[in-house]
């Protein structure tokens, strides 16, 4: 079989670079194009006629769904979605029998996905692939809706190290820290890394459940036992598990006022 002709569509420079490096080390794979937006993707795909698209879901100017739907009446390459979606998206992909990669991207998982494409390449006809992609799009649109509702109901699905998925109750989370394009959920004895910005997650949290103590930290209000200045003058929040979280000047003042209004903080 001729090398698989691959096009990458991802608006995250680090993810794009990571995929390029991984593909360079793989035999029988030819990277024929890359795009960093939905608008650019159409031209790159048209010019390169790839066998496979490594396609991000959420981009600045649209979604991977848009890229597929714009080519509804043309031949479809096989699509491997590159996504940070959790349990619901995984289920959607499984139902539609199209592969996916969860960020951060694992080299072995990428090889497995491309091997699956190779094994199906001769079996699939354009007509069946088009119908398949329509099913994927509908499943993933439903997944986006379910994912949002799940967060609002107090649950987050996170990917574990062994690629299984764990339901985390927000009531078990003491605080949330920002780590570049991810947030880390801090529980009693463990942490979980979730693909989201802290600002995006904050908008989905129930009002009054978490409070911002720093530009890169949210703390569950019920976990706070003390808001104080340390002997060295450091503004900090003490949690019920003993953790100490640095607080910003404005947030510290707001927290003290909040606790005073609720008779939870003395004036001393």
Image (cartoon, rainbow, N blue to C red):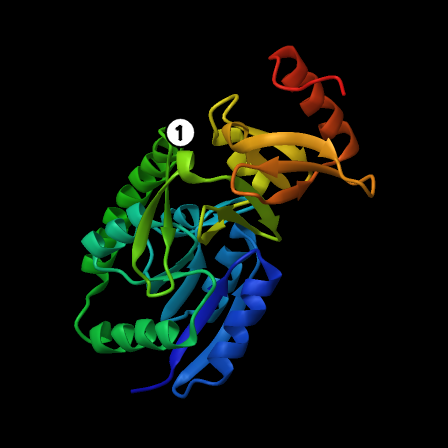
Report the number of numbered marks.
1
In the foreground, 80 or 157 = 157
Query: SS at mark 1?
Result: helix
How many residues crowd mark 1 within 10 Å: few (<14), some (14–19), many (20+)? some
Q: For the view shown, which residue lies furthest in the right direction?
A: 233
At x 33%, y 75%, the residue is 114
| Percent position of residue 27, x then y | 41, 88
Image x and y of residue 187, in percent: 46, 46
Can residue 216 be seen here? The reply is no
- 235 to the left or right of 114: right
Q: Which residue was labeled with disc 1?
A: 152
Horizontal and vertical percent for residue 155?
Answer: 36, 37
Q: Is residue 99 left or right of residue 238?
A: left
Residue 233: image quadrant is: top right
Residue 26 vertical position relative to residue 209 in the rendered view, above or below = below
Residue at x 38%, y 72% (from the top left corner):
110
**With 55 as the anchor, is 223 left or right in this view?**
right
- Residue appearing at x 49%, y 50% in the figure: 195
Residue depicted at 76% across the width and 21% down the height? 268
User: Is 75 in front, or is 182?
Assistant: 182
Which quadrant is the N terminus positioned in?
Answer: bottom left
Q: Does residue 228 sit above or below 108 in this rendering? A: above
Q: Position of residue 20 (x, y in %)?
A: 53, 74
* Residue 9 visible in rendering: yes
* Above or below: residue 90 compared with residue 239: below
Taking depth in this image into account, of 153 and 265 the one nearest to the observer is 265
Left or right: 213 with respect to 181? right
Front position in the image: 122 or 173: 173
């Amino acid at each position: 079989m001729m090398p698989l002709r691959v096009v990458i569509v991802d608006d995250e420079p680090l993810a794009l670079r990571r995929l390029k490096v991984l593909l360079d080390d793989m035999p029988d794979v030819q990277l024929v194009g890359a795009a960093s937006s939905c608008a650019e993707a159409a031209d790159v795909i048209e010019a390169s006629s790839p066998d496979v698209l490594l396609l991000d879901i959420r981009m600045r100017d649209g979604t991977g769904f848009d890229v597929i739907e714009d080519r509804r009446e043309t031949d479809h390459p096989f699509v491997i979605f590159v996504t940070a979606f959790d349990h619901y998206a995984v289920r959607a992909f499984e139902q539609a029998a199209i592969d996916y990669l969860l960020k951060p991207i694992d080299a072995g998982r990428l090889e497995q996905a491309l091997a699956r494409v190779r094994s199906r390449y001769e079996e699939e006809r354009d007509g069946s692939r088009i119908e398949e992609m329509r099913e994927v799009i509908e499943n993933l649109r439903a997944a986006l809706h379910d994912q949002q509702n799940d967060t609002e109901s107090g649950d987050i699905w996170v990917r574990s190290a062994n690629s299984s998925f764990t339901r985390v109750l927000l009531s078990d989370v003491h605080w949330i820290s920002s780590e570049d394009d991810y947030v880390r959920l801090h529980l009693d004895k463990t942490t979980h890394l979730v693909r989201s910005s802290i600002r995006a997650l904050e908008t989905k949290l129930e009002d009054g459940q978490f409070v911002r103590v720093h530009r890169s930290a949210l703390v569950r209000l019920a976990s706070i036992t003390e808001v104080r200045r340390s002997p060295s003058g450091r503004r900090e929040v003490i949690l019920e598990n003993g953790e100490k979280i640095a607080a910003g000047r404005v947030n510290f003042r707001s927290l003290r006022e909040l606790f005073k209004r609720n008779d939870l903080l003395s004036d001393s």
